[in-house]
């Protein structure tokens, strides 16, 4: 069964990647305006993540938050709501852990589908900030983060996954996603951000 699922995943990626690559070529060369998108790092889901991967990812996510905040760039929080699993606004399970350095003023979007753009106002929220380049982190690397990355490309954004700031239930799956989708590391993001704000 796992082999069959892997086959279908590879087949699907083989169909999606050329379309995304073609859309990347047609995007205009307007100045980069970055935003950080933090996806689903909620108390309900974090116990599913291997402890070491969770520790590294949350540390790196805070580093990205500090980087974007120090340059007054948008930070957008995306939360998953699920009545089925009892993950509802107002509950402790719904919230990000207190160790994550978000602020009440950071934009917030609530979704019910894996893709953060599906039937939400995420696109509107991003466009109101003037951003055109998105850096995505959180969980799951093989679920909602990847689905939202595809959604970002479908909405004509430049979108990047953040290396070491992704999580999934399987560390090897996370590494595979980072490799297949060319996740960018902190030094590269810092360079892009500093270059963008200096213009």
Image (cartoon, helix red, strand yellow):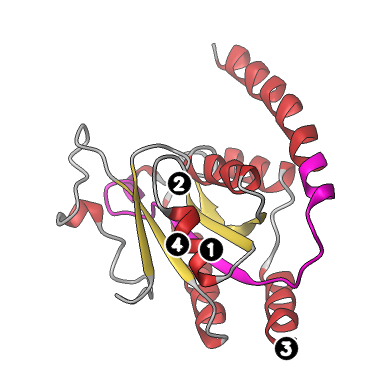
The image's mark for residue 56 is none
Mark 1 secondary-structure assignment:
helix
Going from N to C along the chain, the mark reached first, 3 or 2, is 2
Q: Residue farthest to the left?
A: 90
- Tell me the CA gap for discs 3 and 4: 24 Å
Q: Which residue is mark 3?
A: 198
Looking at the rendering, the stretch of residues picked out in magenta corresponds to: 22-47
The image's mark for residue 116 is 2
Q: Label 1 near label 4: C-beta < 8 Å?
A: yes
Q: Is residue 107 above or below residue 16?
A: below
- Tell me the CA gap for discs 4 and 1: 6 Å
Q: Which residue is mark 4?
A: 125
Going from N to C along the chain, the mark reached first, 1 or 3, is 1
What residue sits 54% from the left and 38% below the top?
Answer: 142
Q: Is residue 34 above or below residue 178?
A: below
> Does the magenta portion include 77?
no
What residue sits 76% from the left and 34% below the top?
Answer: 19
Camera-side residue: 77 or 184?
Answer: 77
Going from N to C along the chain, the mark reached first, 2 or 1, is 2
Which image quadrant is residue 54 in?
Answer: bottom left
Q: Label 2 near label 4: C-beta < 8 Å?
A: no
Q: Nearer the viewer, mark 2 or mark 1?
A: 1
Q: Which residue is mark 1?
A: 127
- Tell me the CA gap for discs 1 and 3: 21 Å
Task: Rate crowding at label 4 as few (under 14), some (14 to 19) or many (20 or more) other CA atoms within 10 Å.
Answer: some
């Amino acid at each position: 069964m796992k082999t069959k699922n892997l086959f279908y995943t590879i087949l699907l990626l083989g169909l999606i990647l050329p379309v995304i690559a073609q859309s990347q070529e047609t995007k205009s060369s307007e100045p980069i305006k970055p935003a950080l998108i933090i996806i689903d790092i909620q108390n309900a889901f974090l116990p599913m993540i291997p402890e070491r991967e969770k520790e590294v990812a949350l540390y790196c996510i805070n580093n990205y938050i500090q980087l974007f905040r120090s340059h007054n760039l948008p930070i957008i929080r995306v939360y998953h709501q699920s009545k089925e699993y009892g993950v509802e606004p107002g509950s402790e399970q719904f919230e990000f852990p207190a160790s994550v350095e978000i602020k009440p003023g950071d934009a917030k979007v609530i979704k019910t589908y894996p893709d953060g753009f599906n039937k939400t106002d995420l696109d509107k929220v991003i466009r109101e900030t003037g951003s055109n380049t998105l850096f995505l982190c959180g969980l799951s690397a093989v679920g909602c983060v990847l689905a939202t990355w595809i959604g970002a490309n479908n909405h004509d954004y430049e979108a990047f996954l953040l290396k070491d700031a992704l999580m999934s239930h399987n560390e090897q799956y996370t590494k595979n996603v980072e490799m297949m989708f060319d996740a960018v590391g902190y030094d590269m993001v810092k360079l892009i951000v500093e270059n963008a704000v200096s213009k």
